[in-house]
Image (cartoon, helix red, strand yellow):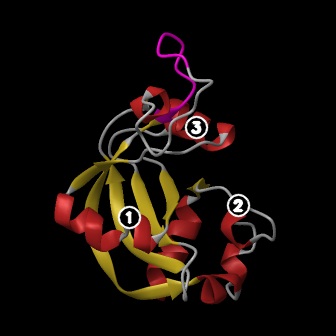
Amino acid sequence: MQYWLMKSEPDVFGIDDLQKVGIEPWDGVRNYQARNMMRDQMQVGDQVFFYHSNCDVPGIVGVAEIATQGYPDDTAVNPEAKYFDPKSDPNKPRWYRVDVKFGRKLKRTISLRELREQTALENMPLVRKGCRLSVMPVTADEWQAILALE
């Protein structure tokens, strides 16, 4: 099993939204590195920290699970979709997504500020300056260190 962190803006799609729907396609990722992780590395059953970004208190708010293998993100080829990419070709998919299944809300938000204060997390991409990826791996040790903060 692998561990991941996936960011979403709570006013676009937050942990409460995932809780309501149960399972949701994680679409709209338009970064090749993040795409490669979803397409090539994520496996059904992998665990995910759900992270709220671009809000008053960014941080980890819940746990989810990867529910499907990566598959083409059809929003890229739909001109009516929010994440349409005119350079995408349905015969040669450029963008991929996975479905994410709600696990649970954390008892509290573990803020980015608090995460940055943890020496056990100093190598985590999330806490490094300039890391803007919306999908990133989390080591097993980092996973346990973060859960211990809850």
Q: Amino acid at mark 1?
A: Phe
- The mark found on residue 35 in the picture is 3
The quadrant of the picture occupied by the C terminus is: bottom left
Mark 3–mark 2 distance (CA, rounded to whole Å): 14 Å
- The tag earlier along the polypeptide, 2 or 1, is 1
Q: Is residue 98 left or right of residue 123?
A: left
Q: Please tell me how crowded label 1 is: few (under 14), some (14-19), or many (20+) other residues with Cα within 10 Å.
A: some
The residue beneath circle 2 is 132
Q: Is residue 138 left or right of residue 129?
A: left
Query: Is 74 situated above or below 25?
Result: above
Residue at the front extreme, as displayed:
80
**Residue 37 place in picture, x, y as percent:** 57, 39
**Residue 17 place in picture, x, y as percent:** 27, 67
Q: Can residue 125 be seen?
A: yes
Q: Amino acid at mark 2?
A: Arg
Which secondary structure type mostly characterizes the magenta part of the structure? loop
The residue beneath circle 1 is 13
Q: Can residue 150 be seen?
A: no
* Magenta span: 89-96
State the SS at label 1. Answer: helix
